[in-house]
Amino acid sequence: MSLAPDRAPHRARRRFGQNFLHDPGVLARIVEAIAPQPGQAIVEIGPGQAALTSRLIERAGHVHAIEIDRDLAALLRERFPADALTLIEADALQVDWRSLAAHISSPSVSLRIVGNLPYNISTPLLFALWPIADLVTDQHFMLQREVVDRMVAAPGSKTYGRLSVMLQFRYRLEKLFDVGAGAFKPVPQVTSSVVRMQPRACGELADVDADAFARVVGAAFGQRRKTLRNALSELFDADDIASSGIDPKARAETLDVESFVRLAQRLISARTKQR
């Protein structure tokens, strides 16, 4: 299970946002946070040079991994037998996640998704995974610290925004720890953080149309400096906003998740009355 000796070392590719984690102490902390177990449906996004992959396999016995870089995919196939690693050579943003979950999980075993995510696709990927949260046990990701701080931000803070509201509605979020740039090769120019995302049970979720919720949140934060009356003018008038128990003069960053839920419910109610 070693890399072929005649291959030249892999050079990180900027277009894939590759920064390979190599610090043993950090890797150990991540594995302990994940606590992988045999029989679990673990999916790693971007295994890269397998620093985390090998440790996950040691604990769980088998991992599914999604790798876009064909050279790294070839190295991974050489290093790990098929009974230890199922490799999916693809762009994680293009994966049909619901079909993948149906293929590798079961009603009693849901996905556990992990990864050191490339910074350039982290936010789009988080949104791509949002619709399959009902099929996921948890997600552990290494992300740029700035992104994690936005994810866990509280209402009223400068970093609270669309990402915060959308993810906090669907997941319980916990920032676990920061990781310095020196833990990676090549060394990035930013600090990273590890975050745990646990989907809320369906019974915990507010009864609200997901598309309406996303539309309201997106419009509210589309121009942060505008009041809700102006930012949501294409969806509501001031009276509609006020009837939801929200000040039309308020700005989006002051509203908690429940306030956005009420606005989305109001939007659906108004549409129903118009029919």
Image (cartoon, rainbow, N blue to C red):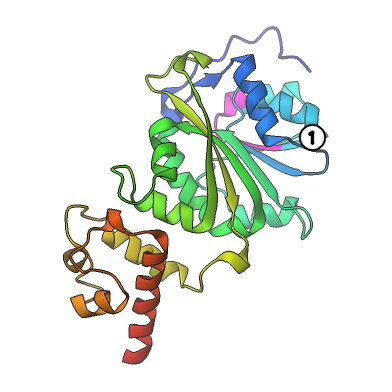
In the image, residue 112 lies at what x, y percent? 67, 44
Percent position of residue 261, x then y: 41, 68
In which quadrant of the rendered view does residue 190 lie? top left
- Please identify the quadrant where the N terminus is shown: top right
Residue closer to the observer: 30 or 245: 245
Q: Please give the name of the residue rendered at 67% of the width and 41% of the height, measured from the top-left corner.
A: 43
Q: Residue at x 46, y 27 (%)?
A: 192
**Looking at the image, is 49 positioned above or below residue 59?**
above
Amino acid type assigned to the residue bearing label 1 in the image: Ala
Helix, strand or loop at disc 1? helix
Q: Please state if 161 lies on the left or on the right of 13 as rendered.
A: left
The reply to whether residue 27 is visible in this rendering is: yes
In this orientation, which residue lies closer to the viewer: 176 or 221?
176
Answer with left or right where residue 49 lies relative to residue 193: right
Q: Which residues are magenta?
A: 64-72
- The residue depicted at 71 percent of the width and 57 percent of the height is 102
Give the percent coordinates (x, y) of residue 240: 26, 79
Q: Does residue 117 appear in the picture of this structure?
A: no
Query: Vertical placement of 160 versus 64: above or below?
Result: below
